């Protein structure tokens, strides 16, 4: 069977492939303005393992040039496992699945001039021909649309502290509930309310596992004091979890939280987080600006130590995610 994206015909081998890759979003009458890189098309066509990557972490999550260097390094780590990386973004209104180095460089230098794009922003960005970096939510959505099942990032959005009055809950969580994609991250930052985030994920039907620990990690540290709903110890177990999710067509997501290595700066970072949250109230920061604001402030207050850990853990997640993807594709054979 085949489908058409921008005049490019994408063929799949058999009906079994069709069942394995959820194509339910495809409807031939709908025209998607999507450009899938040649490499990613080939990987989809021949059933090679793929891992998708988000781009808000490039534009809003890290400063230049570390954002650029990290994005390329993460891609090369993924490749070192024989897995194809697909960084996702919207460039001049066109959804791109798989970016060139030049395109990554472009996003890294425009930084916050790119529109931080979650689900609600997608149609605005595409219809106005704008450039948008995709958050975890939009990246999950596009991954699912083209059939990519494993997505690697640093940290997820979540339920913000004080959400009982502000109602600030990241669209990452509802999107996780709607797509059978496995997201590999280092959990959620303690700028968020971790306990409430796990409650919300349960409501959304999202399977949450911690890799090799009984505790759900807090991004910069292994320890959050919150017990994880599930623990898995091998990449093969994670691949089997994904396989079962697909087989049963649950169409809801999975979070694999990878605890970061021990961090000697965790107290410094913790203090910086608390101060930054207070400062954000004084500065009147609201809505989608809060997460980028806090990341920047925490980085400044820790003299770049938080950024170092951030880079380290994204790479670590890429190692685990790539292996999960490989094992998953082996299960399909
Ligand atoms: N956490 C990070 N780095 C990031 C983000 C979160 O450590 O770059 C980004 C991700 O793209 C995530 C988004 O999807 O922030 C969540 O934003 P919000 O809290 O506004 O939903
Ligand atoms: Mn928010």
Image (cartoon, rainbow, N blue to C red):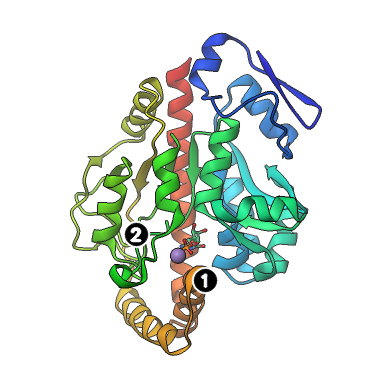
Residue 116 makes an appearance in the image: yes
Image location (x, y in percent) of residue 11: 69, 17
Q: Nearer the viewer, residue 161 or 55?
A: 161
Give me the disc on residue 292: 1
Q: CA distance from mark 2 to mark 1?
A: 23 Å
Q: Please identify, in this view, whether the residue under mark 2 or under mark 1 is nearer the observer.
A: 1
- The answer to whether mark 1 is within 8 Å of ligand 1 is yes
Above or below 239: residue 152: below
Q: Nearer the viewer, residue 35 or 64?
A: 35
Earlier residue among tags 2 and 1: 2
Quick check: 47 left or right of 276? right
Q: For mark 1, give the secondary structure.
A: helix
Answer few, some or many: residues within 10 Å of disc 2's Cα (few below 14, many 20 plus, some between 14 and 19). few
Above or below 42: residue 309: below
Is the Cβ of the residue at disc 2 closer than 8 Å to that at disc 1? Answer: no
Q: For mark 2, give the secondary structure.
A: loop
Q: Quadrant of residue 124?
A: bottom right
Image location (x, y in percent) of residue 5: 74, 30
Name the residue at 48% across, 88% down: 283
Q: Nearer the viewer, residue 326 or 241?
A: 241
Image location (x, y in percent) of residue 76: 61, 46
Name the residue at 55% across, 47% down: 139
Image location (x, y in percent) of residue 247: 38, 20
Quick check: 106 left or right of 246? right
Give the total of numbered labels: 2
Answer few, some or many: residues within 10 Å of disc 1's Cα (few below 14, many 20 plus, some between 14 and 19). some
Name the residue at 70% across, 44% down: 96
Residue 211 makes an appearance in the image: no
Give me the disc on residue 261: 2
Quick check: 237 left or right of 94? left
Q: Quadrant of the N terminus?
A: top right
Name the residue at 41% across, 25% down: 246
């Amino acid at each position: 069977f085949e489908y058409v994206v921008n005049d490019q015909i994408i063929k799949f081998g058999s009906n079994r492939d069709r069942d394995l890759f959820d194509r339910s979003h495809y409807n031939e009458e709908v025209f998607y303005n999507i450009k899938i890189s040649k490499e990613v098309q080939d990987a989809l066509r021949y059933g090679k393992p793929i891992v998708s990557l988000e781009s808000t972490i490039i534009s809003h999550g890290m400063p230049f040039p570390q954002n650029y260097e990290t994005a390329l390094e993460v891609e090369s780590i993924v490749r070192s496992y024989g897995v194809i990386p697909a960084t996702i973004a919207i460039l001049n209104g066109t959804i791109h699945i798989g970016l060139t180095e030049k395109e990554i460089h472009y996003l890294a230098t425009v930084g916050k001039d790119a529109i931080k794009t979650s689900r609600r922003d997608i149609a605005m960005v595409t219809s106005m021909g704008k450039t948008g970096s995709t958050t975890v939510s939009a990246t999950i959505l596009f991954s699912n649309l083209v059939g990519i099942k494993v997505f690697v990032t640093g940290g997820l959005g979540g339920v913000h502290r004080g959400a009982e009055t502000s109602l600030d809950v990241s669209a990452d969580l509802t999107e996780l509930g709607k797509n059978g994609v496995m997201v590999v991250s280092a959990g959620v930052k303690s700028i968020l309310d971790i306990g409430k985030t796990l409650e919300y994920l349960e409501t959304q039907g999202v399977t949450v596992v911690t890799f090799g620990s009984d505790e759900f990690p807090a991004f910069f540290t292994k320890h959050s004091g919150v017990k994880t709903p599930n623990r898995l110890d091998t990449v093969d177990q994670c691949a089997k979890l994904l396989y079962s999710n697909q087989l049963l067509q649950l169409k809801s997501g999975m979070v694999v939280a990878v605890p970061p290595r021990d961090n000697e700066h965790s107290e410094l970072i913790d203090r910086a987080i608390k101060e930054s949250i207070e400062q954000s109230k004084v500065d009147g920061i609201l809505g989608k600006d809060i997460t980028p604001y806090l990341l920047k402030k925490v980085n400044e207050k820790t003299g770049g130590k938080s950024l170092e850990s951030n880079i380290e853990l994204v790479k670590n997640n890429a190692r685990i995610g790539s292996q999960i993807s490989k094992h998953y594709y082996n299960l399909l054979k």
